């Protein structure tokens, strides 16, 4: 049974990772998320056989089926990373909470999966374009606030976490006049602080 759920969450992560790749590309070029997938080089519409996470990249040997230009390694790496992180999130809750389809287990697992998906989006987008879109931060802040309210966790702890993370990043930003760290990181501190709370925020900064 545990193997089945391991496989399910890993596969779910692969699929979500493929979606995250689409979000990163389409947001950058202001394209709708509802359109069909296409090769970014030749523009040819991709079929289902081109879009199977990991498998398509291996089967196509890392090249577009139509124009034969290389496919970015970002795609399989994001898919694989998301799959592994989803599996780890499931395993973490499996060890911390009572196993079963209880409301608590489903709620905490769902929130962790959403949070890590957002963090992967932020990491990859920032790595590629040196920018953290406000929409990602806003979704993270709203989600973390709802989580703290619904899970009956201390809102004050989250706000202190914001002071720690955003305060530290803001200090670096002001002292260096934006040379050491971007203002997007200061805003990201709102999400991270609310998500982690003050103690884990301190651990995160030390790491």
Image (cartoon, rainbow, N blue to C red):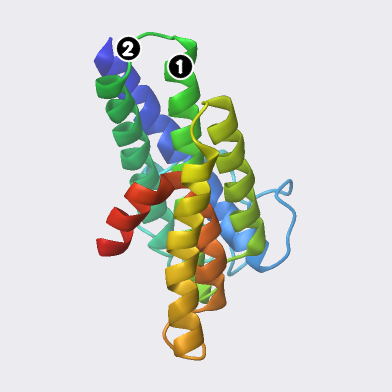
Q: Position of residue 40 (x, y in %)?
A: 59, 65
Residue 165 picture quarter: bottom left
Of 175 and 12, nearer the camera is 175
Q: Position of residue 41 (x, y in %)?
A: 58, 70
Q: Where is residue 32 in the image (x, y as percent from the top left)?
A: 75, 54
Of 26 and 147, nearer the camera is 147
Q: Which residue is rendered at x = 52% and y = 62% of the image?
A: 188
* Image quarter (top left, top right, bottom left or bottom right) of the N terminus: top left
Determine which residue is flagged by label 2. Answer: 98
Task: Kindly identify which numbered label has been placed on residue 53.
Answer: none
Q: Is mark 2 on a helix, strand or loop?
A: loop
Q: Which residue is rendered at x = 28% and y = 23% of the image?
A: 96
Distance between mark 2 and mark 1 Cα atoms: 8 Å
Q: Where is residue 84 in the image (x, y as percent from the top left)?
A: 31, 40
Task: Kindly identify which numbered label has been placed on residue 104.
Answer: 1
Please say whether residue 69 is visible from this viewpoint: no
Please say whether residue 98 is visible from this viewpoint: yes
Q: In this view, does 116 lie above or below 68?
A: above
Evaluate if marks 2 and 1 touch, with contact meaning CB atoms under 8 Å apart: yes
């Amino acid at each position: 049974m545990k193997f089945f759920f391991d496989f399910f969450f890993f596969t779910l992560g692969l699929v979500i990772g493929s979606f995250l790749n689409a979000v990163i590309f389409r947001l950058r070029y202001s394209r709708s998320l509802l359109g069909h997938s296409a090769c970014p080089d030749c523009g040819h519409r991709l079929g289902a056989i081109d879009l199977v996470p990991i498998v398509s990249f291996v089967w196509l040997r890392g090249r577009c089926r139509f124009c034969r230009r290389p496919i970015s390694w970002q795609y399989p790496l994001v898919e694989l990373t998301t799959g592994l992180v989803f599996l780890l999130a499931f395993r973490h809750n499996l060890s911390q909470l009572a196993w079963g389809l209880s409301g608590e287990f489903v709620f905490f697992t769902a929130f962790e999966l959403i949070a890590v998906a957002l963090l992967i989006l932020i990491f990859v987008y920032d790595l590629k374009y040196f920018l953290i879109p406000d929409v990602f931060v806003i979704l993270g802040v709203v989600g973390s606030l709802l989580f703290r309210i619904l899970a009956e966790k201390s809102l004050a702890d989250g706000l202190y976490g914001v002071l720690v993370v955003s305060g530290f990043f803001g200090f670096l930003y002001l002292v260096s006049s934006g040379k050491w760290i971007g203002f997007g990181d200061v805003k990201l501190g709102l999400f991270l602080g609310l998500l982690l709370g003050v103690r884990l925020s301190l651990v995160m900064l030390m790491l």
